[in-house]
């Protein structure tokens, strides 16, 4: 969940301008690195910030974390595709193995 105005801990500095983010200022906290930012320093308009304040299921990541998260999601997607392929190949192998076992049993009898 996004942390905004009114929830800033005392002494938190904006990771962009390095000035304190006070409780009277519009600030936002990255959910991954937990660094604070003035909304103006990360180009979030006042109107956008108001909308963000009403959303309870929205997540915000600073640019470096967002780039890292994007790479992770791409890698997870590729990994998931590989897992699906391996599972399919395993099913096919099991069917082929069962067929071979039947042939071996016929040869024994």
Image: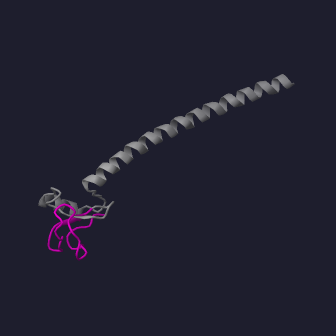
Taking 101 as reference, is 21 above or below it? below
| Quarter of image, res 13 | bottom left
The magenta segment is 1-29
Please provide percent x and percent y for residue 74: 38, 43
Please provide percent x and percent y for residue 57: 31, 60
Residue situated in front as seen by the camera: 26 or 109: 26
Residue under the image location 47 percent in, 42 percent down: 80
The chief SS type of the magenta part is: loop
Residue under the image location 29 percent in, 52 percent down: 66
| Quarter of image, res 30 | bottom left
- The C terminus - image quarter: top right
**Residue 26 lies in the magenta-colored region:** yes
- The N terminus - image quarter: bottom left
Please provide percent x and percent y for residue 54: 22, 63
Taking 108 as reference, is 44 above or below it? below
Task: Farthest residue to the front: give it.
Answer: 18
**Residue 107 lies in the magenta-colored region:** no
**Left or right: residue 30 compared with residue 91:** left
């Amino acid at each position: 969940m996004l942390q905004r105005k009114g929830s800033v801990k005392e002494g938190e500095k904006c990771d962009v301008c390095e000035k304190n983010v006070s409780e009277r200022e519009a600030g936002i906290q990255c959910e991954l690195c937990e660094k604070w930012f003035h909304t103006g320093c990360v180009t979030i308009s006042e109107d956008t910030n108001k909308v963000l304040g009403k959303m309870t299921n929205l997540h915000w990541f600073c640019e470096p974390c967002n780039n890292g998260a994007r790479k992770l999601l791409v890698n997870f997607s590729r990994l998931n595709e590989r897992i699906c392929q391996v599972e399919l190949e395993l099913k096919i192998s099991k069917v082929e193995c069962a067929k071979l076992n039947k042939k071996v049993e016929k040869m024994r009898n």
